[in-house]
Amino acid sequence: MSAAKSSSRKRKRDDSPTRELTVELSSTKTGKGGPYLISYPAVTPPESTAFKCYARKKSKNLEHGIQAEPNDDILLAGETDVVEFMTNEAETERAADSGSQYFLAVHNRRTGKVTLLPQAKTPHLLTHTVKALKSIEPAAVPSKTQFREAKNALGDTFGTKKAKAAIRAQERNHVDIGAMAGVMNYVMDSIQKGAEGLMTTDEAKEFADSNRLIPSFDATATEPNDVYPLHNIIPEAEWKALSVSAFDSTTNDKERLALLPHRHSDWVRRQLKAITTSKDSAKTKKKNLKILLYISGMLAFRQATFKKDIEKDRIYEKLAPLPTIVADSLLSRFTEVPRGTVLHQSTSATKTNLLTHMFALCLKLENFAADTETISKDLSMKTSEINQLFKTLGTHHLPRISSTKSLSDVNPSLLPVPGCKISKLSDRERTRLGIADSVAETKRAVLAAPVEFPKPRLKRKT
């Protein structure tokens, strides 16, 4: 047992004497003569290869007034029998800008002393050139067409089925500009010939204006009252047939309201009271009563045409207070008769056309600042929908005006601009229109002249 234990024991090696390593800074000043750090490319020359130092004629840094480092204007060059080596200036500068620098030191093994040079060094990155290839001219850079052809040939040989199908599709869709050179004149002639029947910008605008679902308007009018002439909404024959003499014998609002075709409207009640209590002349009151009577008839007509098929007798019954010519005119202008039938029908287009004609009359009664919220409640429609219909009439937003000014005192450049918005009236305007302060927060649709219609929104590019 003791012999086995003694044989398994290992003899400890004696500790080697330690040498102290001392570091000191060299007092030798390094200049442009070296030493230099070199980073070789893939090809490494023999250790016996000699390198020479070359200085630039003029340092780039000195041109800009910057003091150059000792190694900044030095180029290293060396060669063997086969390869030449030269400092790559661009790569060397990039390495210097990266912030990587090195300190050189010399280790004396005999004394254990390390002598450190005081100046940091940046390596010179070398590039190599094969001497046998210098006489050969470099190959020209392939054009895009040559590159595509070579790429397609490679894909045809080694590509997958999907890649080959993509190459075939690309070749089918490729347009040869050179082949098109001879037919471009024919193409341009055919385009010009096809464009002969297209409308000009003015003709397109005129066509769009004529197809708007609004009353006929005067785009050159400078006053709001002239934008929509009265007889473009109420034909002159119907206007002459309207009679308001029955209102002269009434004594209260209830009796006056009973003379209207449609009486269930807060807006109509307010306007009726405002007309009868106003200090306007008898001629103005008569005109406004006729307009209100016609609006009431349009409301009654709208209520009677909710059904798809319209009965004439029901229309005459609803519009009994009005002359028959008014009922016939509303039927002809705001309904359609499908081909092969004699029944009148109401469509979305005719309903919109009826509302815009009615709103144009509402603007005339409210001094071209209509209360859209009350109208929306009477029609059981959303206020936003009513506002949008007023915008199609060319209504604008009213600018902020101080209480000491009226619209006539404001610089024309500050008057409503094309925006088709609905906004609140100022204190001065409410006073001028006789509107109570209790409805100051109510937004109104304001018509300004000359009229401009909202432009269609363009689709956002994605």
Image (cartoon, rainbow, N blue to C red):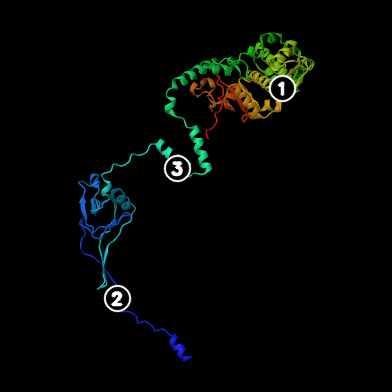
Q: Do callouts 3 and 1 mark residues in contact (Cβ within 8 Å)?
A: no
Distance CA(mark 3)–CA(mark 2): 65 Å
The residue furthest front is 157
Side of 103 where 405 appears, left or right: right
Q: Residue at x 46, y 19 (%)?
A: 186
Task: Give the percent coordinates (x, y) of residue 76.
Answer: 24, 53
Residue at numbered disc 3: 154
The image shows residue 22 at horizontal and vertical percentages of 28, 71
Q: Secondary structure at mark 3?
A: helix
Of the image marks 3 and 1, the number of the one nearer the N terminus: 3
Residue 23 lies in quadrant: bottom left
Instruction: Indicate the secondary structure of the residue bearing disc 2.
Output: loop
Amino acid type of the residue tagged 1 in the rendering: Arg
Q: CA distance from mark 2 to mark 1?
A: 115 Å
- Residue 241 vertical position relative to residue 314 in the rendered view, above or below: above
Residue 66 % position (x, y): 25, 48
Q: Which residue is mark 2?
A: 19
Quickly name the residue at label 1: 269
Q: Earlier in the sequence, mark 3 or mark 2?
A: 2
Q: Which class describes the residues within 10 Å of circle 3: few (<14), some (14-19), or many (20+)?
A: few
Above-or-below relation of 299 to 443 = above
Amino acid type shown at disc 2: Arg
Whole-percent x and y of residue 385? 65, 28
Q: CA distance from mark 3 to mark 1?
A: 85 Å
Q: Amino acid at mark 3?
A: Leu
The answer to whether marks 2 and 1 mark residues whose Cβ atoms lie closer than 8 Å is no
